[in-house]
Image (cartoon, rainbow, N blue to C red):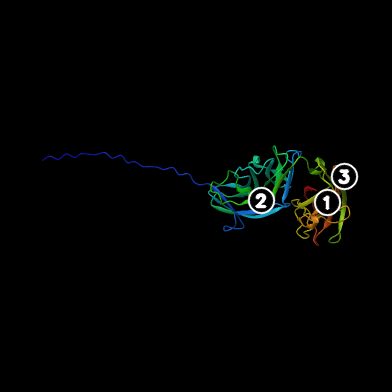
Amino acid sequence: MNMKKILIPFIAMVLFSASSASHAVFCKENDENGSVSRTTQITPSIIYVPANAPEGTIIWQSSPQTVNIYCYAAWIKDTISFWVNPDGVNLGSGVEPAIIYNGRVYTATSGSIPTGNNIGWKPATMRATISYSLAIIRKGPIPSSGSSVIPNYPMFQFDGKKGLNRDKGKNFRNYISGGTFRYTTGGCVLDTVSANKSVGLPSMPIIKTVGAKAGGVDFSIQAVCNNLARSVTFEFFGYADNSDRSQFQNIEKSGAQGIAINLATSDGVTIDPLGGSDSFRTVPAVGGTATLNLRASYIRTSSIVTGGPVSARAYVMVTYN
């Protein structure tokens, strides 16, 4: 019997499945087991939203916040960034959330706001200490009266510059809580000059002893009121000197060491940059204007001093009665 070989062709099929790597940055406070949230209580608890305040006016600002951030990247090279209003949720009528970072105001329309801290290509970690302030600014139409409770609200999320992490709950957020918006037809705001005032001090003389001051310059700031306010309270915040926490820190990179800025009222009482009882000054409103007279001086805060530039930044919040 003749046998024929029958060749049956086989077609080898290799199935390829495309997989998309999950490129993500995860950020927590302090370390890999740290918290992914912080809540800043609103003080004072009532935030007045005056209808006559120009859009962009800061109507509330927190004291300086500092967070030690720990971030992990999964196969991505990126820059750790702020994302304001990460959920795209309305905070309230006539207001908008913001942050103040390195002296500039940013909102959700800013997109990603780089902190300058980068993370590598391979799975890597990074740590950084980041300081900022939270803020609420005037924007959009508001009711002429009434009030609304401020929700427990995420002001920003730390994430990569390339976008927000799809996995919620794995990146650090700073929330605000505990306040009420009160809508008014008028209010008190810093005038245009005071809101962005720059005070120049003379070249720094030699200050021989710790605690001594020099180079003082007198100036004033004003709040203008479009209501029946009897008095205005100016509240100051800023970064405190490492050696003397009652003085404003020199924020110049490679600046003078052992030298800070003393901010005081005209009667010589030092203003506390850390939000204590000496951070408030209340003055009468006369004819719709409240004026606070101040003096800025160099002050020596350490036994060791080096030369270099000196500058400080003070933030001011205005409330009225």
The image quarter in which residue 225 lies:
top right
Numbered disc 3: secondary structure: loop
The residue lying toward the viewer, choosing from 314 and 12, is: 314
Residue 245, how many percent across, how many down? 77, 59
Q: Specify the amino acid type for callout 3.
A: Val
Pointer 3: what residue?
286
Pointer 2: what residue?
176
Pointer 1: what residue?
282
Q: Specify the amino acid type for callout 2.
A: Ile
Q: Is residue 231 left or right of residue 109?
A: right
Q: Is residue 282 visible?
A: yes
Structural distance between the alpha carbons of marks 3 and 1 = 13 Å
Query: Which label's residue is closer to the chain start, 3 or 2?
Result: 2
Q: Is residue 170 left or right of residue 288?
A: left
The residue lying toward the viewer, choosing from 186 and 244, is: 186
Q: Is residue 259 visible?
A: no
Residue at image location 78% in from the left, 51% down from the top: 236
Q: Specify the amino acid type for callout 1.
A: Thr
Q: Around disc 2, counting alpha carbons within 10 Å, would you say few (fewer than 14), some (14 to 19), or many (20 or more)?
A: some
Residue 6, how many percent across, how many down? 20, 39
Residue at image location 64% in from the left, 42% down from the top: 108
The residue lying toward the viewer, choosing from 101 and 234, is: 234
Structural distance between the alpha carbons of marks 1 and 2 = 26 Å
Residue 247, how many percent across, how many down? 80, 56
Numbered disc 2: secondary structure: strand
Q: Around disc 3, counting alpha carbons within 10 Å, would you say few (fewer than 14), some (14 to 19), or many (20 or more)?
A: few
Query: Which label's residue is closer to the chain start, 1 or 2?
Result: 2
